[in-house]
Amino acid sequence: MLNSIFSIKQRGNLDWLLLMLRVGTALFMIVGHGWPKLLLFLSGEPIQFISFLGMSPETSLALAVFAEVLCSVLILVGLGTRVAVLPLLVTMLVAVFYFHAGDPIVKQEMGLHYILVYILLFFTGSGKISADYYLQKRLSVA
């Protein structure tokens, strides 16, 4: 029993944990951040959003929507995960270190958590319970 708790050879558990991490993070990002931004973008109302690196607020919002909705959906299903986390990582870095730069750590904490998760997913990939793994297996057979 004690051996199984401290064992590092339980790869199957890691795949399930990566699935839960991907699905949970993607859903939180879509529902809590991406969907409201998408509705704002499609509303036709004047856009009140940050202007970053000389981009218009509309362009900045469109890029945030792309990352927070589309890239999160890709992470949710585990398709192109290592590439999909890159726009999200950039978005969260901008949110934490530009938009919330002067705020206390409490306002930056959520963004920092997302950054850690995206870095982890970049290095681990999506795991075996993912579209990436399914496609890789399918393409290697063909």
Image (spheres, grey):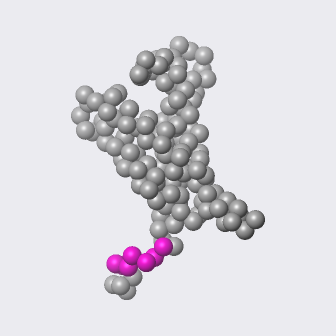
User: Is residue 111 placed above or below 65 in the rendered structure?
Assistant: below
Residue 9 belongs to magenta span: yes
Query: In the image, 63: left or right of 131?
Result: left
Stretch of the chain drawn in magenta: 5-11
Residue 53 rendering spot, x and y as whole percentages: 41, 22
Residue 54 belongs to magenta span: no
Toward the top, the furthest residue is 46
Residue 90 rendering spot, x and y as whole percentages: 43, 37
Residue 20 seen in render: no
The residue positioned 35% from the left and 27% from the top of the image is: 99
The residue positioned 52% from the left and 29% from the top of the image is: 63
User: Is residue 70 placed above or below 139 in the rendered structure?
Assistant: above
User: Is residue 49 placed above or below 34 in the rendered structure?
Assistant: above
- Nearest the eye: 55 or 112: 55
The residue positioned 38% from the left and 32% from the top of the image is: 94
Where residue 3 sits, quadrant-wise, is: bottom left
Toward the right, the furthest residue is 142
- Nearest the eye: 75 or 119: 119
Q: Could you tell me which quadrant the C terminus lies in?
A: bottom right
Residue 130 rendering spot, x and y as whole percentages: 60, 59
